[in-house]
Image: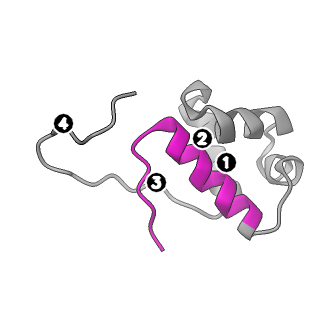
Amino acid sequence: MEYVARTPQQLGQVLRSYRKKRRLTQRAAGSKVGVRQSQISVIEGHGAKATVETLYKVLSALGLELVLRDIGSPDATQPEW
């Protein structure tokens, strides 16, 4: 299943949902790839504060991948962050 995350907050919500779906605590998800529980918490709550490297580690821990897709011309309905 695919989810669209256009803001850091939306990304955090998606990651939290997947982590819970896989029945992992923040600590367990982080320990799979060497990330502290506090970093998982920051990403889930405020995705903009995560480094790209940490984000990729969390995606790996959750068995997810990042897909980039052209959405065409930006319009007024796109959220600004």
The answer to whether the residues at label 3 and label 2 have Cβ atoms under 8 Å apart is yes
Q: Which residue is mark 1?
A: 58
On the image, numbered disc 3 is attached to which residue?
66
Is most of the magenta stretch helix, strand or loop? helix
Please determine whether, in this image, residue 49 is positioned above or below residue 3.
Answer: above
Q: Which residue is mark 4?
A: 76
Label pair 4/2, CB-CB below 8 angstroms:
no
Residue span colored magenta:
1-20
Q: Looking at the picture, tell me which residue is in the foreground, 65 or 75.
A: 75
- Residue 28 rendering spot, x and y as whole percentages: 87, 54
Helix, strand or loop at mark 2: helix
Amino acid at circle 1: Val
Q: What distance separates the C-alpha of mark 4 from that of mark 2? A: 28 Å
Q: Relative to the observer, which residue lies in front, 57 or 73?
A: 73
Q: Mark 2, residues whose alpha carbon is within 10 Å: few (<14), some, or many (≥20)?
A: many
Query: Mark 3 to mark 2: distance in Å?
Result: 10 Å
Q: Which residue is mark 2?
A: 55
Residue at figure coordinates x 66%, y 46% from the top left = 57
Point out residue 3 in the picture as x, y percentages from the top left corner. Answer: 45, 62
Is residue 9 placed above or below 25 in the rendered structure? above
Q: CA distance from mark 4 to mark 3?
A: 25 Å
> Residue 54 lies in magenta, yes or no?
no
What's the distance in space between the residues labelled 2 and 1, CA to CA? 5 Å
* CB-based contact (under 8 Å), mark 2 and mark 1: yes
Q: Looking at the picture, which amino acid does disc 2 mark?
A: Leu
